[in-house]
Amino acid sequence: MTRRDAETRGDARRRTGDFVDDPYLGQVVVGAEELQQRVAELGKEITSDYADHPPLLVGVLKGAFVFMSDLSRSIDLPVEFDFMAVSSYGSATRTSGVVRIEKDLEIDLTDRHVLIVEDIVDSGLTLSYLRKNLAARGPASLEVCALLVKEGLQRGDLELRYKGFGIPPDFVVGYGLDVGQRYRNLPAVHRYTGPLTA
Ligand code: IMP
Ligand code: MG
């Protein structure tokens, strides 16, 4: 396998630089090529569903920035963008469901077709808070596109309109997801086997 092949397959340990000898970076959970393929499919679906009413994409920072960047470029419509930053109280691995808005939207959602773009859904508490919060602002419609959903961990119905992949309930990094702000630029999603501190 050439280095280029390795990169396409998302095997970050074969890349040069900081990730080469990282003992905490585990196996690939979703490869780079798989990600690109699925993102393109989601983009097509969204393009056809929203053909008559292009959506306002609301990205949830910071994790969703990579996914949102790729997804938006596979949507063949004049979409608009806004971003929100939220943090949830709790330990590094578990959200408490109490969410604080660190950065709010700049665009008024009244009568807009809003599509929330999320990187990963774990307990689903962050998302259900966001949904309620944004629904109260009077959008014409409100849907969610989540790239990764940890299987079996959510309380209640998430009503995800678009879902990329269901994954096992392990902690993962890459393609936007971090531990301590690292790993976000990995092209694939990997298991993370190191310590998790807040
Ligand atoms: P939830 O409220 O439990 O669904 O947590 C969702 C948020 O926790 C996500 O938006 C991520 O920011 C973070 N998160 C949950 N699981 C992971 C993971 O495996 N890796 C990185 N971040 C995660
Ligand atoms: Mg997030």
Image: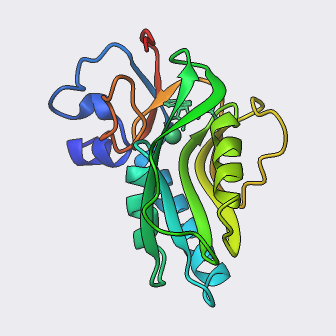
Residue 88, located in which quarter of the rendered image?
top right
Q: Residue at x 68, y 68 (%)?
A: 138
Residue 60 place in picture, x, y as percent: 49, 49
- The answer to whether residue 33 of the structure is visible from this angle is no
- The answer to whether residue 120 of the structure is visible from this angle is yes
Q: Residue at x 45, y 13 (%)?
A: 196
Q: Residue at x 43, y 68 (%)?
A: 81
- Left or right, 127 with reference to 69: right
- Left or right, 148 with reference to 195: right
Residue 51 vertical placement versus 168 (above, below):
below
Name the residue furthest bottom: 52
Q: Quadrant of the C terminus?
A: top left
Residue 167 place in picture, x, y as percent: 64, 36
Q: How is the image coloured?
A: rainbow
Circle count: 0
Residue 73, located in which quarter of the rendered image?
bottom left
Residue 195 place in picture, x, y as percent: 43, 9
Residue 133 vertical placement versus 22 (above, below):
below
Q: Quadrant of the N terminus?
A: top left
Name the residue furthest right: 156
- Left or right, 113 with reference to 151: left
Q: Residue at x 33, y 13 (%)?
A: 23
Residue 59 vertical placement versus 191 (above, below):
below
